[in-house]
Amino acid sequence: MQQEWNIKTRSEACHATGKPFAEGEVFYTALFHNGEGFRRIDLSEEGWSARAADLSAEPIFSYWRSKFEPPAPPAPEPLRRDDAEGMLRHLMESEDPAHLNTRYLLAVMLERKRILRPHKSPEPGTLLYEHAATGETFIITDPGLSLTDLVAVQEEVSVLLSGLSAAPVATEPESTEVRTEVR
């Protein structure tokens, strides 16, 4: 499945009522899928109840319930993100299909570090994640990697991450001769 690689940011107010969310308030996130991609809305419990009562409402692709946490104030000076999260964001922006496996592996790594929270996706082959700190939604395609594919992808991720700490991301094609030890 080919789709747009983008991140959907959590709203600070209810889509239905316009009322700002309070810290710790329970709210619902709903994803809708159409021919152009995904659309996200965030609803207060009041907005969610009103939507549930509306029989003509657009069908939901996926939804989940969360507690609202206000976003952290921005850092005074943006720092370069030389980690798995920064690499995932960079690869999602590039939308290069050659990095499909790498995006998947980075998302799984971030899930295991509890940076990304998985959410149920009704569409096979699509993984939905919510960033634990920012509430952003990440939509990742599951490439169906086998164990034999995993070693090559791990090496690619290792090379990309180690290359970031030494220098900016290179645009040169990756060599198949590069060997790194995965520990």
Image (cartoon, helix red, strand yellow):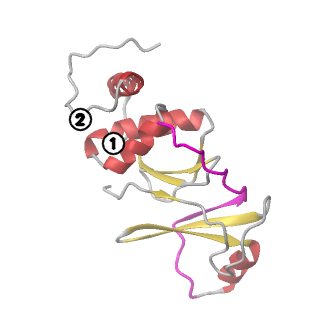
Residue ID at (32%, 24%): 152
Residue ID at (43%, 49%): 140
Tell me the CA gap for discs 2 and 1. Answer: 17 Å
Quick one: quadrant of the N terminus? bottom left
Residue ID at (35%, 70%): 36
Is 19 placed above or below 122 here? below
Instruction: For label 2, count other residues whose C-alpha is less than 10 Å away and answer few (under 14), some (14-19) or many (20+).
Output: few
Secondary structure mainly formed by the magenta segment: loop
Is 140 placed above or below 166 here? below
Pointer 2 or 1: first along the chain: 1
Q: Percent from the top left, x then y, of residue 93?
A: 36, 50
Residue toward you, 10 or 183: 10
Tag on residue 171? 2
Q: Percent from the top left, x then y, of residue 171?
A: 23, 35
Q: Are marks 2 and 1 in contact (CB under 8 Å)?
A: no
Q: Percent from the top left, x then y, of residue 174?
A: 22, 27
Q: Secondary structure at mark 1?
A: helix
Mark 1, residue position = 100
Tell me which segment is drawn in magenta.
56-80
The amino acid pointed to by label 2 is: Thr
Would residue 142 be visible to someone looking at this image?
no
Q: Secondary structure at mark 2?
A: loop
Would residue 102 be visible to someone looking at this image?
yes
Residue toward you, 39 or 120: 39
* Residue at the extreme front of the image, as rendered: 76
Q: Percent from the top left, x then y, of residue 15?
A: 62, 76
Q: Is residue 146 left or right of residue 183?
A: left
Is residue 59 magenta-colored?
yes
